[in-house]
Image (cartoon, helix red, strand yellow):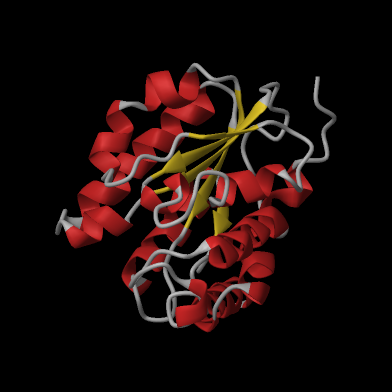
């Protein structure tokens, strides 16, 4: 009974947005590879990670690098789908000494009408390969409100299944605010700083291990 109630609370929290969601979804859950011996935080994704719409150095991985105690590497590629991202995982992720990998895909899959089941399968394979190298995985959800809501639920369930950190609704309050956007869905420099803060708030408990 209590377990079912907790599941219901967690799913309701997904709907409500970021803040309390991150707390409910990640607290007291076993995250795989918290003993990671890797060196770098790898930001792995599409245009949101790449930093589309802003000048070099105004992307969210650069903003994140200013507030963490580990090197941050941006391997976002504008226009990538999860299928294309998976094809470059060895060179762009596995060979870069990952400590934790922030996986951010779905936007282009949605726009290109790639079946959601394939998207989730691709991300699951990314998680499998990264965890197989001993690194932690964090699944970054770029939904906001009802926008990409179905992906948010599926990614949440995937995170629970795989022992990944879940970072929900990172674009909440950004894509509905013209002062935070560079176009209809990409943040501007101010928006990317908010994304970086949301990512940091969620992964910070897993960054306490001193860098070697």
Tell me the quarter of the image containing the C terminus: top right
- Above or below: residue 174 compared with residue 158: below
Q: Left or right of 153: which side holds 57?
A: right
Q: Left or right of 129: which side holds 133?
A: right
In the rendered image, is residue 30 in sight?
no
Residue 166 % position (x, y): 55, 56
Q: Which quadrant of the structure image shows residue 19?
A: bottom right
Tell me the quarter of the image containing the N terminus: bottom right
Q: Left or right of 24: which side holds 96?
A: left
- Above or below: residue 53 compared with residue 162: below
> What residue is shown at x 41% (from left), y 66% (from top)?
152
- Above or below: residue 172 compared with residue 120: below
Q: Which quadrant of the structure image shows residue 85?
A: top left
Asked whether 70 or 209 is in front, the reply is 70
In the rendered image, is residue 150 in sight?
yes
> What residue is shown at x 66% (from left), y 69% (from top)?
24
> What residue is shown at x 42% (from left), y 40% (from top)?
76
Residue 114 % position (x, y): 16, 53
> What residue is shown at x 45% (from left), y 80% (from top)?
178
Residue 207 % position (x, y): 76, 41
Q: Residue furthest front?
A: 55
């Amino acid at each position: 009974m209590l377990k079912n109630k907790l599941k219901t609370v967690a799913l309701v929290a997904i709907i409500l947005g970021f803040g309390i969601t991150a707390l409910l979804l990640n607290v007291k859950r076993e995250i795989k590879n918290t003993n990671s011996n890797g060196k770098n935080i790898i930001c792995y994704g599409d245009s949101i990670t790449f930093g589309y719409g802003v000048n070099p150095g105004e992307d969210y991985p650069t903003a994140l690098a200013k507030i963490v105690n580990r090197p941050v590497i941006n391997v976002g590629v504008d226009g990538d789908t999860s299928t294309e991202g998976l094809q470059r995982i060895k060179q762009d992720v596995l060979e870069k000494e990952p400590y934790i990998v922030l996986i951010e895909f779905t936007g282009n899959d949605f726009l290109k009408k790639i079946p959601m089941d394939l998207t989730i399968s691709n991300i699951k394979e990314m998680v499998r390969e990264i965890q197989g190298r001993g690194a932690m995985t964090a699944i970054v959800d770029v939904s906001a409100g009802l926008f990409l809501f179905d992906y948010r639920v599926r990614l949440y369930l995937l995170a629970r299944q795989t022992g990944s950190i879940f970072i929900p609704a990172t674009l909440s309050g950004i894509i509905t605010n013209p002062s935070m956007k560079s176009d209809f869905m990409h943040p501007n420099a101010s928006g990317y700083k908010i994304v970086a803060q949301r990512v940091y708030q969620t992964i910070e408990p897993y960054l306490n291990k001193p860098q070697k």
